Image: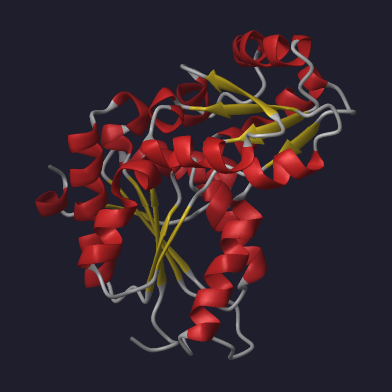
Amino acid sequence: MTAQDPIGVFDSGVGGLSVLREIRRELPGEHLLYVADSRYAPYGEQSEEVIARRALAITTFLVGQSAKAIVVACNTATGVAVDTLRSRFSVPVVAMEPAVKPAAQLSRSAVVGVLATSQTLSGPKFSKLLDAYGAHVKILLQPCPGLVEQVEKGDLSSQATRSLVERYVVPLLEQGADTLVLGCTHYPFVTPVIQAVAGPSVAIIDPSAAVARELGRRLQAGDLLLQNGRAGTERFWTSGEVAKIRALLGQFWTDGADVQSLPSSFLS
């Protein structure tokens, strides 16, 4: 591995672009690789066996593309597969963690709501977070079925999306939550709707920027940080429909981004 090598990032779909966005802000000179595993989206509806298999296959692909570090830009994949990835690959593996700790510290009412997929909320890693930081704060868990699918359709502000957000957020507010944690990388794309429903006094915490900073620290520690003064590049792959992901990249990233199909050997 050298500093010139790229960083590999993956998610079940386009949600991880919220993390990629923060990585680009934090590390403007780095070359980035992104895989949207849209054929299997959302991971929250898949079995642990499928999620683990997909995480291993995509990481193998990215390492084969000379990735010097891997970012698991998906809370569900983190909960299921990150320990396996770290045991099998020598590159740094940086992963998501719902921001329960900072939310607990920030909350004035001592009531925190966590929006996430059912798979993330039921996992052992999340249980450890609750044990570690939930002693003096009431933590309300809210699975959000259907919300990932709205983002994957690029439907960020329709009445259907707002209705879903209201269904999940209003009960948390009624129980006194003054801080909401986005426990899925898709949800930052609907933050404006969440904020509109929750009101301006409710804090919304997205851990993506913290993940980008941790990636920078890991690269610095390994003497792998690229600092050549030039803008980095991005490359994109998907296991799903290329045209669909290209259109979503135009909405979430930039127009004209090139997307390639993930090689067939990494599709199953």
Instruction: Name the quarter where the C terminus is drawn.
Output: top left
Vertical position of residue 200 compared to residue 207: above or below: above
- The residue drawn where x is 85% and y is 22% is 199
- Camera-side residue of 197 and 78: 78
Q: Please provide percent x and percent y for residue 176.
A: 79, 17
Vertical position of residue 132 compared to residue 109: above or below: below
Query: On the picture, is 35 further left or further right than 27?
Result: left
- Camera-side residue of 159 and 9: 9
Query: On the picture, is 195 further left or further right than 252?
Result: right
Of all residues shown, which one is farthest toward the right? 201
Q: Please provide percent x and percent y for residue 130.
A: 55, 35
Residue 159 lies in what quarter of the image?
A: top right
Q: Please provide percent x and percent y for residue 31.
A: 47, 74
Instruction: Name the quarter where the N terminus is drawn.
Output: bottom left
Residue 165 lies in what quarter of the image?
A: top right
Query: On the picture, is 150 further left or further right than 27?
Result: left
- The residue drawn where x is 42% and y is 23% is 118
State the colouring used for the structure image. Answer: secondary structure
- The residue drawn where x is 24% and y is 69% is 89
Query: On the picture, is 129 further left or further right than 203?
Result: left
Residue 222 lies in what quarter of the image?
A: bottom left
Vertical position of residue 118 compared to residue 133: above or below: above
Q: Please provide percent x and percent y for residue 66.
A: 29, 76
- Camera-side residue of 222 and 34: 222
- Camera-side residue of 45 and 172: 172
Say whether residue 84 is visible. Answer: yes
Say whether residue 23 is visible. Answer: no
- The residue drawn where x is 61% and y is 35% is 182
